[in-house]
């Protein structure tokens, strides 16, 4: 994945299919930090943020970025660009704040009468994390695992992230996918309510390694808007062009924890109370958010029709409601792409810092204000302007000014990964060689 992104982020290839990614300990964390709540890295590659939830074809997909390090877990997001030798590592350590946001999925969402939401209906289908949930090794064939990777036996039951296991146990997703330990491993975690989470970890992306697994999932009508029976055929046609969608519940969590996030910047441990992440919204709030999206899309549609003199082809409200939650591809290039033909940009150990705030993050924050605010914000052309990343596009400045410290592209020199062999390290170095791009 790392290699794949490396080529793609710099504009030399296009991902053939929609790909969701999270941060681990070998990513360009400085770029990811521009999009704390996720966004497009390039066409067809969507970053899930520090933690995040999206929907695709009715599947509800959650993610937790980073690796677990206890000494940083309860710190805030204090790191600032340019990163130094310490923060270039701490920035990808999983934080309690982002875990609690995920756990809020299961502790909020009461309806107006205070009744708990139906858990099964809203259950996550897939969650993926970089490091393994702690102790998941006990629910597969660990003896066989230790034959291949005997050093993993040293950690015993402690192997993996306690934060990941907390999320797994509370949210009970149907599937959980991880990486990090450079080995394929399958396990089935049994929950007390007789549901299970099927866990799968895959190996590194290297020749003759188990780095790819294809799983089939039944695509459902979008569960956020239950489709009437007569629209199922139409839905099947639309499934041919499924798009990534916002998860309304997740947007509500982001909005209602924004002040916590903004104030949680300490570089020392600052434990958070989980009570702050409970009962953040009601079903009525979620319905209102959904309606705001429909309003936005109706306005967009009417403007589009006027511009194209297409007033007779107005889309019905029902059709709009089929795609009003689509995450638009609103990527804006806010830094230079790597260009090996430019002699000033030949040092592969460095990439260029972004020259201005990522418009995707500005727009997402604007979107949260517009759709989640309890106040009735008018939806007009001015609103649409604030939801368009083009509004925030700026000219790229030259990146070579001396006061711009260039960031390491990948933290290959860090020692926070698992043991890799010399052979693996050589392979790593080969794949990032410009000759192979
Ligand atoms: Fe890793």
Image: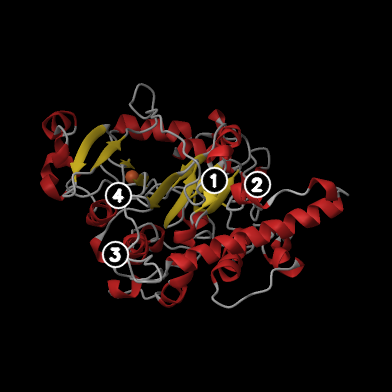
Return the residue at label 1.
Answer: 244
Q: Nearer the viewer, mark 4 or mark 3?
A: 3
Mark positioned earlier in the residue sequence (4 or 3)? 3
Question: Residue 180 appears at what percent x and percent y?
Answer: 31, 42
Q: Secondary structure at mark 2?
A: helix
How far apart in space, not on screen, are marks 2 and 4 (Cα)?
A: 52 Å
Q: Secondary structure at mark 4?
A: loop
Q: Secondary structure at mark 3?
A: helix
Dots 1, 3 in contact, CB < 8 A: no
- In this view, the residue in front, 391 or 382, is 382
Q: Nearer the viewer, mark 2 or mark 1?
A: 2
Return the residue at label 4.
Answer: 415
Dots 2, 1 in contact, CB < 8 A: no
Return the residue at label 2.
Answer: 319
Return the residue at label 3.
Answer: 73
How far apart in space, not on screen, are marks 4 and 1 (Cα)?
A: 35 Å
């Amino acid at each position: 994945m790392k290699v794949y992104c490396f080529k793609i982020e710099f504009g030399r290839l296009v991902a053939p299919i929609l790909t969701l990614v999270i941060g681990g300990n070998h990513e360009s964390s400085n770029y990811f930090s521009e999009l704390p709540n996720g966004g497009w890295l390039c066409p067809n590659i969507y970053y899930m943020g520090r933690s995040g939830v999206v929907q695709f074809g009715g599947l509800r997909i959650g993610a937790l970025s980073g690796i677990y390090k206890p000494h940083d877990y309860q710190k805030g997001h204090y790191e600032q660009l340019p990163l130094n030798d310490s923060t270039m590592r701490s920035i990808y350590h999983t934080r309690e704040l982002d875990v609690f946001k995920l756990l809020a999925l299961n502790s909020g969402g009461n309806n107006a009468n205070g009744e708990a939401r139906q858990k099964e209906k809203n259950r996550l289908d897939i969650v993926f994390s970089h490091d393994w949930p702690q102790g998941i090794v006990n629910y597969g064939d660990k003896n066989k695992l230790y034959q291949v990777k005997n050093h993993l036996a040293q950690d015993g039951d402690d192997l993996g992230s306690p934060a990941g296991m907390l999320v797994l146990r509370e949210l009970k997703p149907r599937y959980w996918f991880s990486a990090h330990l450079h080995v394929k491993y399958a396990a089935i975690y049994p929950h007390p309510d007789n549901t299970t989470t099927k866990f799968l970890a895959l190996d590194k992306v290297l020749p003759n390694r188990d780095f790819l697994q294809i799983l089939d999932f039944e695509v459902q009508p979008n569960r956020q808007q239950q489709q009437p029976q007569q629209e199922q055929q139409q839905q099947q046609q639309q499934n041919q062009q499924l798009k990534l969608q916002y998860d309304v519940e997740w947007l509500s969590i982001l909005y209602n924890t924004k002040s916590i996030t903004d104030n949680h910047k300490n570089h020392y441990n600052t434990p958070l109370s989980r009570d702050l992440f409970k009962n953040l919204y009601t079903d009525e709030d979620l319905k209102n958010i959904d309606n705001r999206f429909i309003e936005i899309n109706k306005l967009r549609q009417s403007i589009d029709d006027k511009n194209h003199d297409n007033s007779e082809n107005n889309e019905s409200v029902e059709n709009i409601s089929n795609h009003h939650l689509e995450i638009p591809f609103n990527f804006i290039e806010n830094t230079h792409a790597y260009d090996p033909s430019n002699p000033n940009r030949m040092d592969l150990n460095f990439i260029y810092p972004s020259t201005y705030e990522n418009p995707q993050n500005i727009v997402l924050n604007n979107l949260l204000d517009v759709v989640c605010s309890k106040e009735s914000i008018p939806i007009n052309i001015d609103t649409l302007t604030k939801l368009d990343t083009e509004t925030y596009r700026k000219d790229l400045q030259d990146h070579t000014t001396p006061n711009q410290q260039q960031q390491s592209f990948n933290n290959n020199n860090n020692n926070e990964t698992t043991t890799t062999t010399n052979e693996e390290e050589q392979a790593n170095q080969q794949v990032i060689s410009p000759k192979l791009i």
